Amino acid sequence: MSGRNGGGVGGLQAVGGVLGMLGVLGGGLYWLGKQKSPQSTTDDSARKTLQNRYARGEIDEEEYRRRRERLDATDEDFSN
């Protein structure tokens, strides 16, 4: 164990460090790939809420269509 590199322990630490860095990098890339833009998440939840309220009878068809058109217009504003 009195060799130049401490009996091979230094090499093991280097491999562990490289594998750890690759794990952190891979986890970060995975997380970034799963992220959605805030606008699309908001639009999806707003549409779902609107559909649910209409399905439960909280709003009538006229109100549903008016609000859906407003959401569609908002989508067009952000896509340009």
Image (cartoon, rainbow, N blue to C red):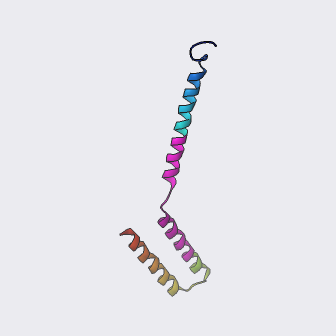
Of residue 57 and residue 75, the one placed in the foreground of this image is: 75
Count the marks: 0
Q: Position of residue 53 (x, y in %)?
A: 59, 79
Tell which residue pokes out farthest to the left in this image: 80
Identify whether 33 is placed above or below 19. Answer: below
Q: Position of residue 47 (x, y in %)?
A: 52, 73
- Residue at x 51%, y 82% (from the top left corner): 64
Q: Is residue 29 left or right of residue 2?
A: left
Q: Quadrant of the N terminus?
A: top right
Identify whether 38 is placed above or below 8. Answer: below
- Residue at x 52%, y 68% (from the top left corner): 42
- Residue at x 53%, y 37% (from the top left corner): 21
Identify whether 15 is placed above or below 28. Answer: above
Secondary structure of the magenta portion, mostly? helix
Of residue 64 and residue 41, the one placed in the foreground of this image is: 41
| Magenta region | 24-51
Q: Is residue 30 left or right of residue 72?
A: right
Let me know if residue 65 is in the magenta part. no
Tell which residue pokes out farthest to the right in this image: 1
- Residue at x 45%, y 80% (from the top left corner): 70
Let me know if residue 28 is in the magenta part. yes
Q: Position of residue 36 (x, y in %)?
A: 49, 59
Identify whether 42 is placed above or below 61. Answer: above
Q: Quadrant of the C terminus?
A: bottom left
